[in-house]
Image: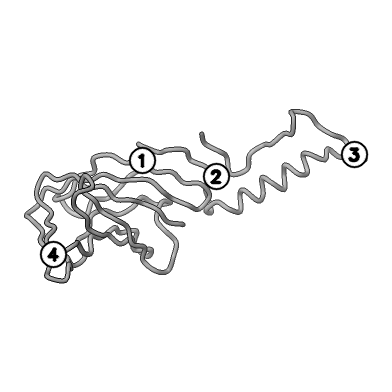
Amino acid sequence: MTTDVKPTLYLDGTKLLVGGVATEIVNDTNIANWLGSLSPAGATLYDTGWVTSDLTFTMGSADWTLTQYALTRVGRHISGSIRVTYNGATLTPSANGNLGDVTVLTMPTGWQHGSPLPVQATFTNSGVKTAFVRFNSATGICALTHAIPGVTLSAGEAWDIAVDYYI
């Protein structure tokens, strides 16, 4: 269910007049303004519901394909999952797990996190393999940074990015 940034709220569907003022409308306005303050600038919805289409992701290279996604934004909190398929040469982490910064994708405008520090997230392959990505706040880039030593990324594998951050 989606919720507007400035919803019209009614208590019991009636208006209570106190001193000629519709009291619940004053309260509704205050609530609506408060909800609006919890949403990012320019947002029209406080709660987007699950979004599974119509977002534009930029893939890091031809090695990555966006398979599907389900994201939701409630206020400034973004959560959900993004599934990508890797089609490049096998990636193998160094002995300490470092993969460098392999750009997987760039998040759509309005869905990029707002912290001045990068946000880490898990990157899993059917729950069997685990690697880690970082969301960069300045660029919106989601980059694969490291994996558990011994984990490789091979062509044709589907990977899920767990998204959970504030914008």
* Figure colour scheme: one colour
Q: Is residue 154 above or below residue 16?
A: below
Q: Which residue is mark 1?
A: 70
Residue pushed farthest top?
Answer: 13
| Location of residue 109 in the rendering, given as x and y in whole percent from the top left corner | 39, 52
Q: Residue at x 10, y 61 (%)?
A: 92
| Location of residue 164 in the rendering, given as x and y in whole percent from the top left corner | 40, 53
Q: Earlier in the sequence, mark 1 or mark 3?
A: 3
| Location of residue 72 in the rendering, given as x and y in whole percent from the top left corner | 43, 43
**Label 1 is placed on what type of residue?**
Ala
- Mark 4, other Cα within 10 Å: few <14 / some 14–19 / many ≥20: many
User: Judging from the image, what secondary structure is the residue with disc 4 in?
Assistant: loop
User: Judging from the image, what secondary structure is the residue with disc 2 in?
Assistant: strand
- Mark 2, other Cα within 10 Å: few <14 / some 14–19 / many ≥20: many
Per the model, the C-alpha gap separating discs 2 and 3 is 30 Å
Q: Which residue is mark 3?
A: 18
Q: Earlier in the sequence, mark 2 or mark 4?
A: 2
User: Judging from the image, what secondary structure is the residue with disc 1 in?
Assistant: strand
| Marks 2, 4: nearer the viewer | 4
| Marks 1, 4: nearer the viewer | 4
Q: Which residue is mark 4?
A: 93
Q: Which residue is mark 2?
A: 46
Per the model, the C-alpha gap separating discs 2 and 1 is 17 Å
Q: Earlier in the sequence, mark 2 or mark 3?
A: 3
| Location of residue 36 in the rendering, given as x and y in whole percent from the top left corner | 61, 49
User: Judging from the image, what secondary structure is the residue with disc 3 in?
Assistant: strand
The answer to whether 34 appears left or right of 151 in the picture is right
Residue pushed farthest bottom?
Answer: 96
**Label 3 is placed on what type of residue?**
Val
Per the model, the C-alpha gap separating discs 4 and 3 is 69 Å
Per the model, the C-alpha gap separating discs 1 and 3 is 46 Å
Q: Is residue 53 above or below residue 63?
A: above
